[in-house]
Image (cartoon, rainbow, N blue to C red):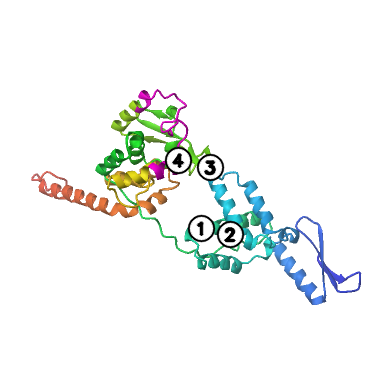
Amino acid sequence: MAHIRRARSGQGWEARYRDPHGKERARTFNTKRDAQQFIAGAEADLQRGDWLDPRVGRIRFDDWADEWLATAVHLKPNTRYGYERLLERHVLPVFGGKRIANIERIDVRRFVSDMTTAGMAAGTVRNAFTVVRNVFNIALDSGAVKANPCARVKMPRSPRAEMLFLDPAQIVALAEAIGDEYALLVKTAAYTGLRAGELQALRVRRVDLDKCNLDVVESLSEVEGQLIFGETKTYSRRQVGVPASLAAELRLHITTRSLGPDDLVFAGPRGGPMRHNNFYNRHFKPAVVRGALPDGLRFHDLRHTCAALLISEGAHPRAIMERLGHSTVQVAIDRYGHLFPRIHAELTDSLDKLYRGGHDDPTSAGATSSDG
């Protein structure tokens, strides 16, 4: 049972209580009233299940950050590297030396505000905030804090990069402008919707040209100059259909190069893995200019192009989600929802034709029988 008593030194008052594990805890205060208030608060926390071990709360933020990185085994190498850079450059200089339990919501708000007013890009601010929130989630799960102070902290709006879409003629123009070495890569990107890293990690044994399918199981990324094969972005292993005409071109590409099962379908100049930045700067961007294609066109826009082509053919959002490897249908809707109204209008026109056709047909359902 919790109680207070005079400290053995005769100076101050000692508050004693037992934690949820039955271990006796003690703390000394200058006045009896402070000791009584502490005991009342501790007992209330114990009853609510909110009691925190004060020793855990004294651990510094940077130690919890190390714990988070050590246990976040799900992070892809590129993502981990990005988080480590954010910690080093932005997060730890502000929070690193502070006790985790002493950091409050106002501190997190100031952190976001200071980064924003310093001119940091909204995406950088958001990602740094994500790091802080993840560290606090570890501390919360371990009983070091009662709540995550990142809750209800508003982020600056991040302007989404404009999506550009090519029509089939423009896809051909880009393929011709980029030359034979990478023309098939461009067309495969536009008509399958695979990410750059997924295309660059695609091996011949993952290509079933008889069934016109690609098995998308890994992705290639570059971290500090090192090329790493790993899981796809959303861990979405999936099978993607290939148009028959494109499959024929892929078959010719593989056979003329005598590629084996473990060879990369789209390799670098020397046969090894492609370095996307080199390809993008040396080949893709110049091809965009030569082909008189929309200014600012990115390789990733070929993925958006695939989505737009699917939508123009009446594809359901779920089909788009599964093909592109989005985590949820909502992601597909949020990203490409603005393209659907035109399709809805076309479908409505089709329904109108059916409606008018039904009314023009005297034998249609609802017509009155002459037999009474």
Give coordinates of residue 287: x percent, y percent. Answer: 33, 43
168 shown above or below 107: above
CB-based contact (under 8 Å), mark 2 and mark 4? no
Most foreground residue, 136 or 163: 163
Most foreground residue, 289 or 352: 289
CB-based contact (under 8 Å), mark 1 and mark 2? yes
Give coordinates of residue 18: x percent, y percent. Answer: 79, 61
Q: Amino acid at mark 2?
A: His
Label of residue 225 in the image: 3
Q: Which region shows up in magenta?
A: 253-282
For discs 3 and 2, the disc positioned in front in the rendered view: 3
Q: Is residue 298 visible?
A: yes
- Disc 1: CA contacts within 10 A as few (<14), some (14-19) or many (>=20): some
Q: Circle 2 — which element?
A: helix
Please count the marks in the image: 4
Question: Circle 1 sits on which residue?
Answer: 124
CB-based contact (under 8 Å), mark 4 and mark 1? no
Query: Which residue is drawn at the image coordinates 48% and 38% (left, top)?
Result: 219
- Disc 3: CA contacts within 10 A as few (<14), some (14-19) or many (>=20): few
User: Along the horizontal axis of the image, is 68 left or right of 256?
Assistant: right
For discs 3 and 1, the disc positioned in front in the rendered view: 3
Question: Circle 2 sits on which residue?
Answer: 90
- Disc 2: CA contacts within 10 A as few (<14), some (14-19) or many (>=20): some
Query: Which residue is drawn at the image coordinates 45% and 63% (left, top)?
Result: 157
For discs 4 and 3, the disc positioned in front in the rendered view: 3
24 shown above or below 83: below
CB-based contact (under 8 Å), mark 4 and mark 3? no
